[in-house]
Image (tube, coloured by chain):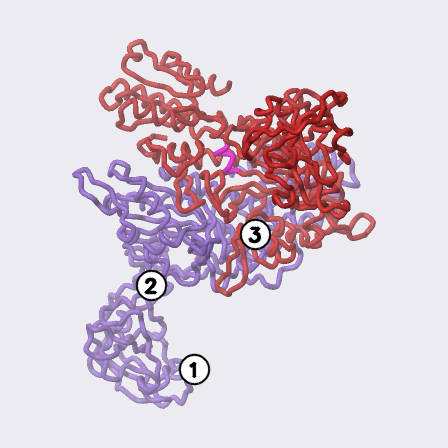
Chain colours: A red, B purple
Amino acid sequence: MRSSQYLLSTLKETPSDAEIVSHQLMLRAGMIRKVAAGLYTWTPTGLRVMRKVEQVVREEMEATGALEILMPMVQPADLWQESGRWDAYGPELLRIKDRNQRDFLLGPTHEEVISELVRKEISSYKQLPLSLFQIQTKFRDEIRPRFGVMRAREFLMKDAYSFHLDEQSLQQTYDTMHQAYCRIFERLGLDYRPVIADTGSIGGSHSHEFHVLAQSGEDAIAFSDSSDYAANVEMAEALAPTEQRPQASAEMQVVDIKLKAGQQAADKLAISSSQTLRTVLVRASDEVTSEFVYLVVRGDHELNDVKAAKLAEVATPLEIVTDQDVIGCVDLFQGPWLDYPIIADHSAAVLADFACGDNNNGKWRTGVNWERDLRFSRSADIRNVVDGDPSPCGKGNLRIARGIEVGHIFQLGTKYSDAMKVGVLTESGKHQTLTMGCYGIGVSRIVAAAIEQNHDERGIVWPAALAPFDVVLIPMNMHKSERVKEVAEALYQACLDAGLSVLFDDRKERPGVMFADMELVGIPHQVVIGERNLDQQEVEYQSRKTGEKEKVAVDQVIAYVQTQLQQ
Amino acid sequence: MRSSQYLLSTLKETPSDAEIVSHQLMLRAGMIRKVAAGLYTWTPTGLRVMRKVEQVVREEMEATGALEILMPMVQPADLWQESGRWDAYGPELLRIKDRNQRDFLLGPTHEEVISELVRKEISSYKQLPLSLFQIQTKFRDEIRPRFGVMRAREFLMKDAYSFHLDEQSLQQTYDTMHQAYCRIFERLGLDYRPVIADTGSIGGSHSHEFHVLAQSGEDAIAFSDSSDYAANVEMAEALAPTEQRPQASAEMQVVDIKLKAGQQAADKLAISSSQTLRTVLVRASDEVTSEFVYLVVRGDHELNDVKAAKLAEVATPLEIVTDQDVIGCVDLFQGPWLDYPIIADHSAAVLADFACGDNNNGKWRTGVNWERDLRFSRSADIRNVVDGDPSPCGKGNLRIARGIEVGHIFQLGTKYSDAMKVGVLTESGKHQTLTMGCYGIGVSRIVAAAIEQNHDERGIVWPAALAPFDVVLIPMNMHKSERVKEVAEALYQACLDAGLSVLFDDRKERPGVMFADMELVGIPHQVVIGERNLDQQEVEYQSRKTGEKEKVAVDQVIAYVQTQLQQ
């Protein structure tokens, strides 16, 4: 492709409304253009990258034996009424009426349509298990579309659905999909983690998210430094300390630290926050006779809402009480002194001589000890893991990283197949409801996530599998030098003949503009053709990633680039 | 692919709601399933075919130098308000509101979005001409969706748009696109015609439709039997007869033929309908002093509404008067006897001694002659061409065929670029509005059109380029014969090794069921593996298209099929 016949559309300035680096770079590198809030046109460079993602995803889905289909983006309401989601789904579901005032919607996912297909087409256990997938435009009417294609309203997704006679078959396909997802992200050259995830409102027993690691990620994930274990922080188990609780050695004292709420009590007391308690009062469930329950964690830990909500003693949804009339003080001075049951995090349960609020504004207590001064009804895992915690897998310690969720696989169970009566006749002639799995990948989101992970101050640094072009030819002042022009044109033809994906920057631009554009767009391999090097029959190769430069003979450079491509 | 791991989904019965053969066969062959009126899921076999169309279209578009982009399906209303189409477009445009009650629409085409892109991205004449295309889902809220994917509401379309400084540049790209379209349909193996088309309401100077010829086609097209000339019948010129009008030889007589309206007057008069006049009264334009104008064509010809509406003397839109209080009789007995100007079709103008209505119910006149009995103000081409007419290109005679419109190319001119201010600075620094072309292909519709053209009583007969699989292996009673199973499995592996697109029908079905299914799905090359032929180390090859059978040695059959594929 010649730049002069291409729509490069690079921008020098960073658009002011782009908050994160991938959004900025996708605009600046001419990959997308905004049409309206959360709606984008993919310009040639952007689409080239997205098609590469799409193709890798398709190949790996096909390798699992999944069959590709294409379901409509516009879906009839009646199927969603049958599943119950027409009412249950919030305003992210864009409900529309056709010319006959019939209800339709723009599909955010396709569980209903696929369930309708399978209940009509599959009648025998012999046709199972069955996996179907599509790569199709989705629409979610986000309340706050932002971050470019990272959280767009219209986006491209691969969604797969599997149907099974039993849990064991579902588990097999789930494992196969898990492996396929790993291969996809490996082939794309991304640093990723499959993490154990909360199944949330969608229900079902097992779920993994696939995260591309990047500092700007919205999610915190915990992973072992010595194994494959990784989990969303909200799901990662904090193991109970193996050490025993020390003997009490201090007297309990009330200290007036004369602090206003919001300032660090531990600092004022000159003790480590790991020797303090953080106290949270929550509404109790029916399993407890009192109205409230205390949840306490170490002062250097954070209460994990997901874990807390799963405690039998705690009402769901979790309701944290901060009303001063109930807790008797501002939060900073709260301690578990009122007559409610205490559930202590395992790490808090092994403290001795610790400090906590006194339940009087301005005052804390020090030298507090369990049993002697306070009793907890039980200890449990109710905190977020932190960097350095032992990994729950038993190997190594946990590290915390930020991740961008780009894939999610679920064991759905019979949530949809029950509601929509998706079943078959078994070998013994009985009707059986099918068990389902679903498997999503955000195709367009991967493009943005890849940039969040792979960029520098000059622009995008594409992993090889994602680059819009593999090689760029940059002739210096070609329009003034016949020799440069001749060599550049010959190399361009040679690249085409060798089947390379090449951009030939034949624009009448200053070399500085060309270098800046090509580094911004992030083409992995640059070949610079200039007068001076041509005196030695050489051109200059430069790697976008490492910045390393190498002078290479003109007649060797194609082979040289091919060698680089294979690395 | 093994049938046992594929979703074949063939049907024995023809679904009752499928009116045309392509719809019936797409349902029966398991290519599509209805989700709601005009909304379909493409099942694996259907999608395989559609992706083949898509790929050929993409390759030929890229070969023209057009760049692929992807615009959103959901479009903001403000762009359509700017172009004027928000109000002008009928209820086929599905207007929707997002969660903030802002107006959007589901894109039926993308002229507005592309104009918005180009006016922002292109600022200099140096970047022109520019052609952009996308392959994207479209939505038209058809009042009567029918014929399966032939007239669906959601469908897949390739739409391209080109931008130019002048008409000459537009003409060049238009010609390039015309050639690309021809290559597309040739590569797809379809019998097609590019036909001169009416530009209709979209305006612009030039337009061609591309039709796949099929008896079920909704459009009539006229083409020369001796040249490339082809036109939509509404556009094809009927040349004026070269012969002179004969002398009048009969007396004019009023004949009471005692017919009720609706019966053939010519038959009753025992004359050829080509010796009669058909009279139509229409409202006149301001260019004529009278209120109405007579249009007369020969009784064996039909008035062409498009041509008639273009006459200066005739009001647009064309308004045909049938009110008996005005014409003085029922239509059958209408003759041009009232005091309004007459415009005679060229063929009617050379009649002598002809018959026409008398303007009194029940009566006609015979022996009528121009000049002596009636005067026309002028003659013009106002009829549809008929089979056998001389071709307006000067070569050969016209034939009439039915066609299915699958592509349409337009010279749009400045319709959108004027309204949306799409312009650049020219070399001399002046602002200039761009000239546009647009080029559509109905990707999903081509699949149905191909079937309309290529089928027999047993099912679909795919052209090679469109077949969902190239080869099918049909083992007979494999589950009873170890030898058949062994050979079939070995041949399947050999097909995969040879890179053939192969379906291996390993289902536990009777041979009759397998043959019927595979002929229905229309896989071009069948290899049947049966006990009897294996005694001679042979299998049977059969061509789906010709039905020819050939016994081929087991170890030769892959090479044999490859030879067939190359033909």
Earlier along the polypeptide chain: callout 1 or callout 2?
1
**Residue at the spot of label 3:** A90
Q: Nearer the viewer, residue B474 or A554?
A: A554
Q: Going 36% across and 65% down the picture, which residue do you hit? A: B386
Secondary-structure class at tag 1: loop
- Closer to viewer: mark 1 or mark 3: 3
- The chain letter for the residue carrying disc 2 is B
Amino acid type of the residue that numbered disc 1 sits on in the rendered structure: Gln
Q: Is the residue B210 above or below the residue A387 in the image?
A: below
Q: Is residue A445 magenta?
A: yes
Q: Nearer the viewer, residue A104 or A353?
A: A353
Write the start and end of the magenta stretch as one range.
Answer: A443-449
Tell me if label 1 and label 2 are in contact, CB under 8 Å. Answer: no
Q: Is residue B505 left or right of residue A104?
A: right
Q: Is the residue B7 above or below the residue B141 in the image?
A: above
**Residue at the spot of label 1:** B263
Q: Which percent across, then down, holds residue B325?
A: 33, 87
Instruction: Measure how far apart labels 1 and 3 are at the Cα level.
Output: 64 Å
Q: Which percent across, then down, holds residue B363?
A: 35, 88
Amino acid type of the residue that numbered disc 2 sits on in the rendered structure: Asp
Q: Is residue B549 magenta?
A: no
Tell me if label 2 and label 3 are in contact, CB under 8 Å. Answer: no
Q: Which percent across, then down, holds residue A204?
A: 70, 43
Q: Could you confirm whether marks 1 and 3 are on the same chain?
A: no
Q: Going 78% across and 53% down the picture, which residue do you hit? A: A431
